[in-house]
Amino acid sequence: MNKKIDDKEMNFSNPVYLDANATEPLRPKARAAMLEAADVTGNPSSVHQAGRRARALLEEARNTLASRMDVAPLNCVFTAGGTEANVLAMHGLGQGRRFLVGRTEHDAVRKGMPDGADVGWLEVDTHGQVRLDLLEAALHAGSTPAFVCLMLANNETGVLHPLDEVARLCRQYGAHLHVDAVQAAGRMELSVEQCGADSLACSGHKMGGPKGAGALLLRGPAPRPLAPLFEGGGQEQGRRGGTQPLPAIA
């Protein structure tokens, strides 16, 4: 029992990967889709044949994700990942609002708010869930409408916030509810409409896709106005500039 184990006796050739909350292994279907899209030369914004083929793959991916997440296709805005989707939501939809942010939110949200924003922190209970009484008090106290940021599933603990009640309170007080669903999408049934989110962020590599693609999903009529972080060439209905990373999106 006390024998010292020599490193040479240990087998490191088949490590067991247990850090799916950071990134999941690439799934075979995702790899195949990525390689197929990588062979498409065209830019999705080009009008020639190669560009139209790339555009068809892009819109197929958009329709698939939008249908699965219960939003209009034109309200699915592709980004470079979950962090950009969160920051885009806060900067593009939070103008004129004060921010109410969960104390246990990911740094992508905690550090991504607009400079000079009016920020209030929402405390959690001993189970890690937002305290609804404090949320309601904060919503009631402000003179301007709020922009509430709460993740669906915590990236460290897995705790789920009671989004049904949170959404009800946000509707009651005219607040915008943004949900960071990066750790939940692909791991549980999820509908933007049913969970009550006004905007929701997700990321491909957290659900078995390649790194480099995410999406901001918007509830309501399409295309929903959204001020871009950078304008570029007017891609994504003018809401996110830059050539879309087609292989990662596919």
Image (cartoon, grey):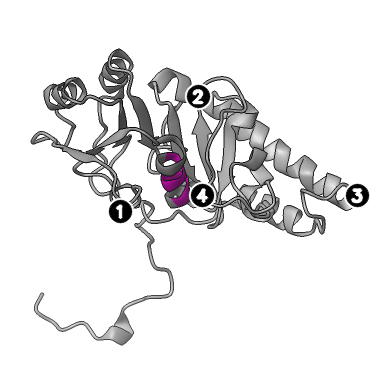
N-terminal label among 3 and 4: 3
Residue type highlighted by circle 4 = Leu
Q: Is residue 206 left or right of residue 67?
A: left
The residue furthest top is 172
Give residue 5's quadrant in the image. bottom left
- Residue linked to disc 1: 111
Q: Is residue 55 above or below residue 142?
A: below
Q: In this view, does 47 lie to the left or right of 188?
A: right
Residue type highlighted by circle 1 = Lys
Q: Which residue is drawn at 63% across and 48% down?
A: 249
The percent coordinates of residue 1 (x first, y second) are: 10, 74
Give residue 141's quadrant in the image. top left
- Residue linked to disc 4: 229
Give the secondary structure at mark 1.
loop
* Spatial separation of the CA atoms under disc 3 and disc 2: 33 Å
Residue type highlighted by circle 3 = His
Q: Return the residue nearer the eye: 248 or 97.
A: 97
Badges 3 and 4: C-beta atoms under 8 Å apart?
no
Give neighbour class at mark 4: few <14, some 14-19, many 20+ (Cα, 10 Å). Answer: some
N-terminal label among 1 and 4: 1
Give neighbour class at mark 1: few <14, some 14-19, many 20+ (Cα, 10 Å). Answer: few
N-terminal label among 3 and 1: 3
The magenta segment: 84-89
Give the secondary structure at mark 2.
loop
Q: Residue 48 carries which label?
A: 3
Q: Residue at x 49, y 56 (%)?
A: 25
- Closer to the eye: label 1 or 4: 4
Residue type highlighted by circle 2 = Arg
Give the secondary structure at mark 3.
loop
- Closer to the eye: label 4 or 2: 4
